[in-house]
C-alpha cells in the first residue's frame, strides 16, 4: 500500500498504523462506514453498509441515489469506519478522551457491470454484516439487481488509529478528588423482534450476532 | 433554515425531515460525528466528538491537527451523525435494511478566539457527551486552551433521515420459510473501570450514562 500526504499520521502517531492486518481487523469488526465525496465543491458524508474482500471495499445503494451516481464516475472517495470502545474520563477536562478504533481509507470506486459480479459483491456485503443470512433469503431478482448500483473500491492507502487504556493525567492532577477511569461502551444486540406471525426458529447467526 | 440542492432529500423522502426539532433530537442523542471536508481536492472524513447549542455545532481538536487547520480557514464542512438502531432482516436479500437515525448538516466553521468563548464551547461539548463531568474536573489551563482549536459551525442547512419498523417484503415472499424481523442494536455502557486506586464513589452521571 502506498502512502502519500493524505494518509500520513501527523499527530499521536503512536496510536496509528498502516499495516493491512490492523486495517482489515478494524474494518471487519464494523458494518457501518461513513463515505465522503465531493460534488460541486461541497463535501458530503453519507452513512452506509459495506463489505470487504481482500483489499477491496464494496458499497451498494439505489441506482437513483446521489451518492451512487457521483461515486460511479470515479471521483475520489474517503471511507471511514469508527468503533467507539469507551469514554476516557480524566481528572482534567483537557485529558478527556475516547477509546476507539478507526480506519480512514482512500480510493476511487468503479461500478460493477455484470450480474454475477454484482451478486458476488452483495453477498460479501451481506456476509460482512451477518454471515449466514445470504443463504437463507431469496436472492436478488434481475430487476432488483438492475435497480441496485454496486461499487468496488480498492483501498489505495489508509491509516488506522486505535486508543486503548485509561486516562493519562498530568502528575499534579492525580491527587484531585474526582473519579477517573474508563466507561466502556459496546454495541449489543437486543432480543430479536419477529415480523408477523412466522413460527420459524431464530437462526443462530441472529442469536449470536456480535458475540464473536 | 434554507434548503438548497445539497440537503434536499431525493429518495425515500418519507423517511426524511428538515425540521429543527427532528434534527436536534438526533444530534443530541449522539456524541460522535463524522466530519467531511476537502483538502487539495481530496475528501476527508474524520470521526470526532461534538456539542450542540441552539443551531451551532462545536468541534475541538489539537491546534496541530490537519482537520482543525483546514476547517478554521472557513471551507465547506459536512457534519454527519448516525445512530444505528437495528438490522432489518427481510425475506429477500433486496429488502434488507437498517433502522437508523441520521443527520447530514452543512455549514462553515469559524475559529473561536477568546478563552471565555473557547471554555464555553468546550463545556458544551463536555455536557453533550456526559453532563455533570465538567463541574467535577480541573478546568482547562491557559496553556491547554492555547493548544486547543475550538470551532463553531452554524448549521446552514441539514436533513434528517429515520427508518423504523420491520421489513417491507414483496407480497409473494411472505410465505418463504425464513425468519424475518428486526435485530435491535444498542450502544450500552459496561461497568466503569477506575484508573489507579482512587476510592471516590462513581458519580451518578457515569452510572446512569445513556440510560435516559
Image (cartoon, coloured by chain):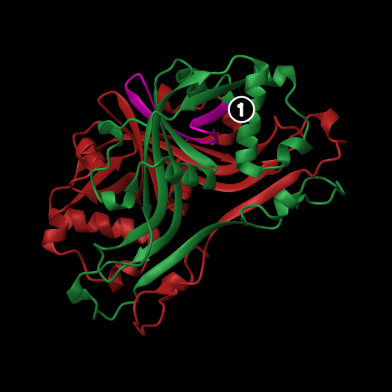
Chain colours: A red, B green
Residue A98 occupies which quadrant of the picture?
A: top right
Q: Quadrant of the N terminus of chain A?
A: top left
Tag 1: Cα neighbours inside 10 Å, few (<14), some, or many (≥20)? many
Q: Position of residue B102 (x, y in %)?
A: 41, 46
- How many badges with numbers are in the image? 1
Instruction: Tell me the residue at 11%/60% (across/down).
Output: A143
Residue A52 falls within the magenta-colored stretch: no
Q: Is residue A56 above or below residue A11?
A: below
Residue A149 locus on image (x, y percent): 19, 48
Q: Is residue A164 visible?
A: no
To which residue does mark 1 refer? B121
Kindly state the secondary structure of the residue where label 1 is placed: helix
Position of residue A114 relative to residue B24, above or below, is below
> In this image, B58 relative to A31: left or right?
right
Q: Is residue B47 left or right of residue B135?
A: left
**Label 1 is found on which chain of the structure?**
B
The span picked out in magenta is B37-60
- Judge by depth and name the residue closer to the eye, A88 or B172: B172
Which picture quadrant has residue A66?
Answer: top left
Q: Position of residue B12 (x, y in %)?
A: 26, 51
Q: Is residue A32 visible?
A: yes
> Which residue lies at the image location 78% right of the left edge and 38% below the top edge?
B136
Q: Main structural element of the magenta stretch: helix, strand or loop?
A: strand
Residue at figure coordinates x 57%, y 43% from the top left: A100
Instruction: State the image coordinates of residue A179 (x, y, percent, origin top left).
Output: 80, 44
Image height check: is A137 above or below A180?
Answer: below
Front residue of this view, candidates A15 and A203? A203
Q: Is residue B10 left or right of residue A203?
A: left
Relative to residue A40, is residue B161 drawn left or right? right
Viewer-side residue, A61 vs B172: B172
Amino acid at each position: 500500500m502506498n502512502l502519500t500526504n493524505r494518509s500520513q499520521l501527523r499527530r499521536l502517531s503512536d496510536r496509528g498504523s498502516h499495516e493491512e492486518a490492523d486495517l482489515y481487523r478494524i474494518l471487519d469488526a464494523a458494518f457501518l462506514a461513513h463515505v465522503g465525496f465531493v460534488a460541486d465543491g461541497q463535501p458530503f458524508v453519507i452513512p452506509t453498509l459495506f463489505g470487504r474482500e481482500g483489499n477491496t471495499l464494496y458499497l451498494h445503494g439505489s441506482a437513483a441515489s446521489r451518492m451512487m451516481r457521483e461515486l460511479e464516475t470515479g471521483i475520489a472517495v474517503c471511507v471511514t469506519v469508527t468503533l467507539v470502545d469507551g469514554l476516557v474520563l480524566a481528572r482534567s477536562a483537557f485529558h478527556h478522551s475516547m477509546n476507539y478504533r478507526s480506519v480512514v481509507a482512500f480510493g476511487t470506486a468503479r461500478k460493477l457491470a455484470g450480474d454475477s459480479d454484482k451478486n458476488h459483491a452483495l453477498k460479501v456485503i451481506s456476509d460482512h454484516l451477518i454471515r449466514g443470512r445470504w443463504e437463507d433469503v431469496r436472492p436478488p431478482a434481475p430487476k432488483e439487481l438492475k435497480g441496485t448500483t454496486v461499487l468496488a473500491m480498492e483501498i489505495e492507502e489508509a491509516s488506522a488509529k486505535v486508543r486503548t487504556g485509561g486516562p493519562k493525567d498530568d502528575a499534579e492532577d492525580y491527587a484531585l478528588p474526582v473519579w477517573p477511569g474508563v466507561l466502556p461502551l459496546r454495541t449489543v444486540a437486543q432480543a430479536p423482534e419477529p415480523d408477523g406471525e412466522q413460527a420459524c426458529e431464530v437462526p443462530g447467526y441472529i442469536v449470536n450476532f456480535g458475540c464473536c
